[in-house]
Amino acid sequence: MIHGSIVALVTPFKDGKLDEDALRRMVAWHVEQGTDGIVPVGTTGECPTLSHDEHFRVIEITSEVAKGKCAIIAGAGSNNPVEAIEYTRAAEKFGADATLHIAGYYNRPNQDGLYAHFKMVHDATNIPIILYNVPGRAVVNIQPDTVARLAELPRVIGIKDATGDLARPWIERLKVRKKDFIWLSGEDATAVSYDVAGGTGVISVTANVAPRLVHEVQELCLAERYAEARDKQDRLTRLHKLMFKEPSPAGAKYACSLLGLCTEECRLPITPLSQETKNEIKAEMEALSLI
């Protein structure tokens, strides 16, 4: 069930509070647009600045609207395994299909420490776990041998790779013995290349803005029609880059506001976009006939 275009969903705010009505509209829109999966309360969902109650509520609403219609992979990561267990149990309670787990930021554990962190969460919970390797944010890097070791745990079912190293899926696939392990790109700009190397999907920021186009690219990749996927990805490349011209998710939030989905409001320390970037995003969305 976990494959294709999986949106790293923004969390809508209004006047400083979680906008529950906007969240319901957004999730329903993604289902209608063909999004294959939703990641609520990930990095793009501003999880570091959500309260625990808000974190749980976002998962609950997402499940209420989308359960059984697309995969729900709840963000549950923390550098504190006790907190990660709490988030994971809440995700299971509210009906998520799997959880997404980062580890190591600030603590900076070695590979044995990373393994022990994930194993502690695994052994204390009952829901599938997808590893999230993003050294650009977490500083630490889950090395291929550690990925293979973790994949031996029954409910560690896949990885989201945001290393930007396109040799990684080739190396890791040779080491991981679990045949149904799930390989997901965590970077929009290199997602097609990652799929060529054995990936089966992307957890996408751009899918907040262009869900149908991102879904079409992934469908072509899953059908191994890579030349067509490349051509469609070419159309999206500038939008991919604009989503990160300034700190995310400000770009995605602004684009969603142009679509009438939510306000552009982010929580500090993410600040509003410059007018120059707003103009570029709007022009590119117009060029892609998104607005």
Image: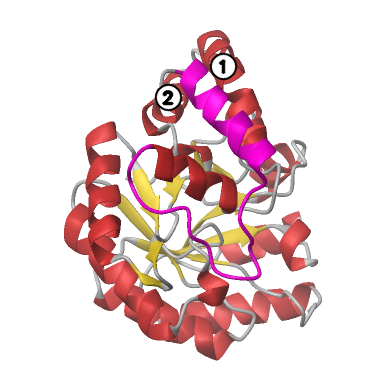
Q: Position of residue 273 (x, y in %)?
A: 63, 49
**Would you call the spot at circle 1 few (<14 residues within 10 Å), some (14-19), or many (20 or more)?**
some
Q: Quadrant of the N terminus?
A: top left
Question: Amino acid under label 2?
Answer: Leu
Residue, far bottom: 82
Give the quadrant of residue 64.
bottom left
Q: Position of residue 2 (x, y in %)?
A: 38, 46
Q: Position of residue 39 (x, y in %)?
A: 42, 56
Q: Which residue is mark 2?
A: 213
Q: Which residue is mark 1?
A: 235
Tell me which label, 1 or 2, sits earlier in the chain: 2
Q: Are marks 1 and 2 in contact (CB under 8 Å)?
A: yes
Residue 217, which numbered label?
Answer: none
Question: Amino acid under label 1?
Answer: Arg
Give the quadrant of residue 247.
bottom right
- The secondary structure type at the circle numbered 2 is helix
Q: Residue at x 61, y 41 (%)?
A: 243
Is residue 247 in the magenta section?
no
- Residue range in magenta is 259-288
179 with respect to 97 (left or right): right
Q: Residue at x 45, y 55 (%)?
A: 10
- The secondary structure type at the circle numbered 1 is helix
